[in-house]
Image (spheres, rainbow, N blue to C red):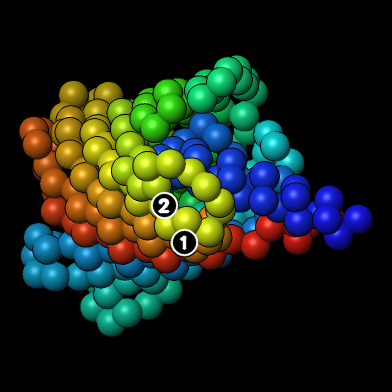
Amino acid sequence: MKKLFFLALIILCARITVSGQELYVFTEPASNMPTKSIGVRITNEGMFNYPGYVSRTIPEVMFGFNKNLMAHAQVFLSDMDGKYRLEGGSIYAKYRFLSLDEAHSHFRASAFGRVSTSKRPTYTKDINLEGDNSGMQGGLIFTQLLHKLALSATLGYAHAFENQARQIAGMPRPNNMLSYSLSSGYLVLPITYKDYKQPNFNVYLELLGKTDPSSGQSYLDVAPAVQMILNSKTRIDLGYRFQATGDMEGRYTKNMYLVRAEFNFFNVLK
């Protein structure tokens, strides 16, 4: 029985390592985390044109309920309004409804939804449900793995909840936002997979865009990133996003770094 358990664990970790290039830094893939697993993340984001430097910390817990359903619970803390404080939280869920598997490749399609709350004043049209705005979002994700290359596209629509008590006079109130992204990830190391303890090194390039349907204002960010995976359980991300083009006013995430550490625990949910 023990031999079967360890064999299953090795196979599971091998699948995680081989598909590591799908673990995008700024977006989610259509694939889900392993069944009955729990992941713990801590993310730090730093913004340089707020004005001045500010940062946000995001503790997060992830649950892999089965091969098709997973969920995230996040808490947001930052010093963007003075002292470091609790801003709010978010619940994210993703359901995979299509899987097409072939040798050295697969295609996944998922639907996702998010509900967020935030104490921050609502004064920018760039709706961000990871700390800045209260609201809800839904969308679709499509991910294609081709050996060492993974490509993914996301389309989402967000609605910010109205809160006049936190509205700054004379400033626009966020309403609705169309978001879209195109992400690519490439497995650099290992060149030849031998066991799940091998370090995994991935490089990413993501294009992140949004459009305000009411005004037509939009932007497109470029986000390169690198990633290390250790023992198929520990993940370290380092990325930076910057605006390539756009005319949306009041943005402060267009020059932002991201640092993340993630720890995964397999076969712990009953």
Where residue 109 sits, quadrant-wise, is top right
What amino acid is at disc 2?
A: Asn
Asked where in the image residue 206 lies, by quadrant, the reply is top left
Give the side of residue 174 with respect to residue 241, left or right. right
Which quadrant of the view contains residue 173? top left
Disc 1 and disc 2 in contact, CB within 8 angstroms: yes
- Quickly name the residue at label 1: 230
- Above/below status of 226 relative to 60: above
User: Residue at left 31%, top 28%?
Assistant: 182
Which residue is at the front of the view, 6 or 84? 6
Residue 264 appears in the rendering: yes
Q: Which mark is residue 200?
A: 2
Q: How many marks?
A: 2
Residue sitting nearer the eye, 110 or 119 = 110
**Front one among 184 and 240:** 184
Q: Is mark 2 on a helix, strand or loop?
A: strand
Q: Where is residue 52 in the image (x, y as percent from the top left)?
A: 9, 69
Front-lying residue, 17 or 181: 17
Q: Residues within 10 Å of mark 2 (few under 14, many from 20)?
A: many
Measuring from the top left, give residue 223's x and y in whole percent.
Answer: 21, 43
In the rendered structure, which disc, 1 or 2, sits on the residue that comes first in sequence? 2
